[in-house]
Image: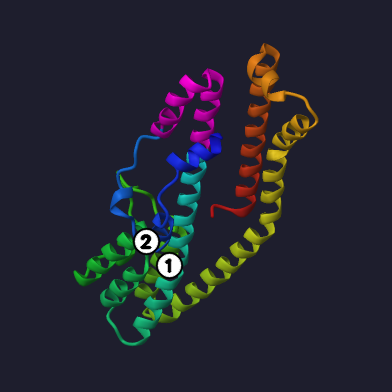
Amino acid sequence: MAAAVGCLVGLPRPGGLRLEAVGVVPAASRRAPPFWLPAALAVAPAALLLGPVVALLLSVGTLAVRRTAAVRRRTAARRAERRRAVEACATLAGELRAGRSPAAALAVAAELACGPSRDVLQSAAATARLGGDVAGALLPTEAPVSGPVTAVPEVLRALAACWTVCAASGSGLAAAVDRLEEGLRADQDRRRAVEAELAGPRATAGMLAVLPLAGLLLATGLGADPAHVLLHTPLGLVCLAGGLFLDGLGLLWTGRLVARAGGSG
């Protein structure tokens, strides 16, 4: 029930994730409601109809679902930015080989990028048009005061290094960016392989997390009343709180292990 309420009031509208994946943020999603609002909407009627314990469970479930959805949105946005950064590097190399000026090539590449990396590439293109330090524009000395940080800092650092070396040595920038793009694609393939390998542990963790619920359903089917014990007796409330805490702790621990094995995403 908690998950259902969380899905109704805590998840984004359909299509929002697809738009974010291509670098377009819907106008309605730019001003998100407060994080606690879905939980409050779930608790208010539940406290009157089902009691304080169920209301607390609903609030925790709603916040957990909303938190999970936010993490998944951020992960999808980071993956999209990384994927589009690889495409931008390939386009940059192609534009340079075609004889375009560095400023024009950077402007075209910026159109293919998404997220904060697009802003960095657009700034670098403007700097190139003015004859400034393009490598410095690709490597801002300070983190942005507001707004998200780019998910591909290593790509921008490598591109800035290519720019610096080619400017100092007089070698072709297109060939250097080509080699950078090949390395990025190899890294992208490695990340995909790791994600495929980690699908099994993720599924196992999810299955283990719902096993207690399966046990409660089995006990109910055998004629017991575990819901009454867990919700209306002191010992049951202690067991319920402890079980939920350990279950959540296990999911958090497993998630961090999987995230560490998979890298930053």
Question: Does residue 144 appear left or right of residue 43 in this picture?
Answer: left
| Extreme residue in the top direction | 234
Amino acid type assigned to the residue bearing label 2 in the image = Gly
Q: Is residue 260 visible?
A: yes
Residue 19 in picture, x, y percent from top left: 38, 60
Amino acid type assigned to the residue bearing label 1 in the image = Arg
At label 2, counting other C-alpha atoms closer than 10 Å, the crowd grade (few under 14, some 14-19, many 20 or more) is: some
2 or 1: mark nearer the eye? 2
Q: Which residue is mark 2?
A: 23
Colouring chosen for the image of the structure: rainbow
Magenta residues span 36-64
Q: Are marks 2 and 1 in contact (CB under 8 Å)?
A: yes
Q: Is residue 136 visible?
A: no
Image quarter hosting the C terminus:
bottom right
**Residue under the image location 36 percent in, 35 percent down:** 34
Of helix, strand and loop, which mostly describes the magenta segment?
helix
Q: Is residue 255 above or below residue 182?
A: above
Magenta stretch containing residue 155, yes or no? no
In the rendering, which numbered label is found on residue 84? Answer: 1
Residue 239 in picture, x, y percent from top left: 70, 20
Residue 189 in picture, x, y percent from top left: 59, 68
